[in-house]
Structures are given as structure tokens and as C-alpha cells.
Amino acid sequence: MTTMNQTTVIIASKAGRLGNRLFQGAHFMGNALSKGYQLFNPSLGEYAHLFEGSARDPLCGFPQPWRDDDPEFADQCRQILFQGVQLLGMATVRGMIPGVKSVDIRRFDEVEGGDVDLKGEVFTPLLEAGQLILPMGWKFSDHSGIQKHRKEIVRYFTPVESIRKPAEKIVSHARELGDLLVGVHIRQDDYRQWKNGIHFYETERYAQWMRELSERNSDNKVVFLVCASNSLDESLFNDLSVVKGPGSPCGDLYALSLCDKIIGPPSTFSGWASYHGGVPLCMLQDAFTSVAPENFARF
């Protein structure tokens, strides 16, 4: 680990919903461990109380916590602190705060493809200068760091017991019903409009993929753990062995991470489940995607 000179990084903007927010934090966490700086991530915001590493810390510090408070008090403080950090970030973008640097890529976030390498020429010189740095945007990445330090990152983002235990109970029950447990992430509500519905699939199409997986694994009894963002017509799964996920975003995410395989549309949600659990994922890029073995990979 390289040691930087008293460098502190505070993530100063929120990045979408749960999956995006987790990957945003994880890339910086991997980079922080590789480069030796202190990270604070109050942008976890409304999701911070869900995880063991952040629930009690108003500033979500890593690798060292800032404070250890009552979770409810930490959550209240976090809302105020993030507003302050966000204002500081916007003032820094305008050059109003001497000695504090911002890296604002929020416009770049809307561009298809590509990301900003935290080991590259934009961010590294700031680290070496020992600055207080306020990144804004979510397409920052350290792909080697997030893999090298996966164990520490996953430990930090372990769900709290009230979410973890019910999910584990559902997964344990599902495993009693068969030999191979496949997590199915069905995302339909917002995907009807997003990118003109390119990744929206009807429930029947998901059922077809599930049948294809059963046929490809005919030597095993396949059980499907279905986690959906909306209510489904369950009669479409009558010929399949199906168990419903916990029903909350974090509970579903954790349950998917405990499966043997995962299928789902392009999303950081199923991507995080794959990363967290080291589970092979088949991203359903379009309605013609096959769930053949070669289309599964760990995120």
C-alpha cells in the first residue's frame, strides 16, 4: 500500500440508487487501500444504515471510521453532513475554497461508456499533493483495486443483522428444495421507459430463460430465487420451482449474492450481487440473450 501525505477524500455527490451508490463507494475504497488515503462517503446517505461498516458512522469513514454512534443518531447527522459536503463541493468547483480540490465529472456520468480512472492523470496528482479532494460523479473507477481489496469492501458492505438473517433464512429454505439455486433479478417498472425500454422484458420472457436454465441443468433440480421490483403474475412460473426474495432492495441484493448463479438485465444491482458473493452473472443484454454457460461471468 502506498502512503500519501495526509490526503483525505470526501465523496461529495450521490450516484443514483443503491447499486450505483455501492459501486461508487467500492471503487474509491479499493483505491483508498491501494493508495493509502482516508475516505469519507456520506453520499451513501439513505442506504448507509443498511450496512455493518457504515450504520454507526455519520461520515462513513474507510478504512478508519470517523465515529461510532447510535445508528439512528448517525443517520440524522449524516443528512446534515452530506448537505454541508455537497455545498463545499459546489463552492470548490467555483474555486472559492483555497487548498481544497474538486473533481467534477457529473456531466460525464451521462455519457455512454467509459469512466475516469482513479489511478490516472486526473486524480493521482491530487493524491500526491496531499489535498482535501471532493469528487463529484459516479463514473470513477479503480478496477484493479476493487478486485484486489474485495474482501475488505464486502466486509464493510455486509448487511446489518435485521436484513441479513431473514435473507439467509429464505436462501436456506430455497436450497432445501433443490440442487442448484439461481437468482433471478426482474426489473420492469423503471425499465419500461429507460433507454426506450431496451432492457425491459415481459415476465413471460424471464420464465422462458428460467426454463432454458432448467433444461441446460437437467441433471440437477434447479430452484429459482426471484427478486422483482414490482408485483408479478406468479402463474407464469407454475411449472418451475420458485421462491420469492425478501422483498426489500437490500434484502434482495444480499439474497441474490448467496445464489449459485444470477440472471438479470444490465444493472449495477445484479452486478453488485455478483461482486459481493463472487457469483457468476448472466446479464440479459437483450431479449435474444442465451443463458448458456459461456455467458456467465463474475462481476
Image: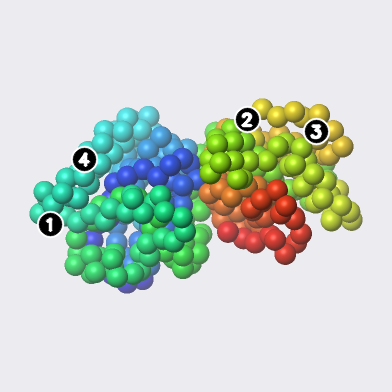
For the C terminus, the image quarter is bottom right
Reading the chain from its start, which is encountered first: label 3 or label 1?
1
Reading the chain from its start, which is encountered first: label 1 or label 2?
1
Left or right of residue 1: residue 240: right
Left or right of residue 71: residue 292: right
| Label 4: how many Cα within 10 Å (few below 14, some 14–19, many 20+) | some
Q: Quadrant of residue 238?
A: top right
Q: Residue at x 63, y 41 (%)?
A: 200
Reading the chain from its start, which is encountered first: label 4 or label 1?
4
Q: Which residue is mark 1?
A: 99
Q: Amino acid at mark 4?
A: Leu
Q: Which residue is mark 3?
A: 236
Q: Secondary structure at mark 3?
A: helix
Q: Is residue 36 above or below residue 219?
A: below
How many angstroms separate mark 4 from mark 1 (CA)? 16 Å
Reading the chain from its start, which is encountered first: label 4 or label 3?
4
| Label 3: how many Cα within 10 Å (few below 14, some 14–19, many 20+) | some
Q: Quadrant of residue 188?
A: top right
Q: Secondary structure at mark 1?
A: loop
Task: State the residue lying farthest toward the right.
Answer: 219
Q: Which residue is mark 4?
A: 87
How many angstroms separate mark 1 from mark 2 (CA)? 47 Å
